[in-house]
Amino acid sequence: MIIRFLSIFLKPKKNRGWPVKYNDKWGILNANGQIIIEPIYDYIYGFKEGFSKARLNGKLGIIDPNGKMIAKPQFDDVYEFNNGFSIVKIGNKWGYVNAYGVLIKPQFDEVSLFKNGMAPIKIGNKWTFVNTQGKLLGSSFNRVKNFYEGLAPVEINHKWGLINKKGRFEVPPVFNYIGELKEGLIKVRIKGRWGFINRKGKVIIRM
């Protein structure tokens, strides 16, 4: 269908297509003037990372530039895609949806971005991790940081250590502070003294 003479409102976007408004509904127009997504939505936000939020009847869904519904309108909030996942919210719970529409059910009180195949999530007052298949790590902690090179800093009983992706401690929680693993070294503090350890917990540099 070619738009020839319609009352529309255009918002050009960097990625594919332009959101257009017609009869108080929004669709998507391509560079050839063809409607590729019929104007059925209450609002379309514009494409980023190949996807757009679309609002319908007060709920948010996710569409691709061809008009395919990746996730039906059911969410109260939707974040931009990052590392293959969008953070989504239903009610006061958070979850994830991937680029294929596979949903990790919103069930978490707080969430963070996926990095290296794992994402920090909070249930109640404890933190743990979820992988890209939606499987939770069995262990829980007071605080956590993202995984780097297969290890993540976690705090339990006011002490920090390093766990692997199975939830086992590679470096026991004995530090007052522990940074992220970078180029084989981790910055740590214990009893007021700073230094660097390797991924096995061996002190490499004292400060």
Image (cartoon, rainbow, N blue to C red):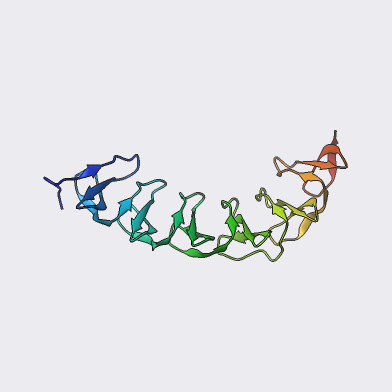
Q: In the depicted view, which residue is nearer to us: 26 or 34?
A: 26
Horizontal and vertical percent position of residue 11: 28, 41
Q: Residue at x 72, y 58 (%)?
A: 141
Horizontal and vertical percent position of residue 7: 16, 45
Horizontal and vertical percent position of residue 38: 23, 56
188 vs 76: above or below: above
Q: Quadrant of residue 54?
A: bottom left
Q: In the depicted view, which residue is nearer to us: 75 or 177?
A: 75
Q: Residue at x 23, y 43 (%)?
A: 9
Q: Quadrant of residue 195?
A: top right
Q: In the depicted view, which residue is nearer to us: 126 or 130?
A: 126
Q: Residue at x 19, y 53 (%)?
A: 23
Q: Residue furthest top?
A: 207
Q: Give the quarter of the figure containing the C terminus.
A: top right
Q: Residue furthest left?
A: 5
Q: In the depicted view, which residue is nearer to us: 111 or 124?
A: 124
Indicate left or right for 92 with 184 as reference: left
Q: Residue at x 71, y 53 (%)?
A: 143
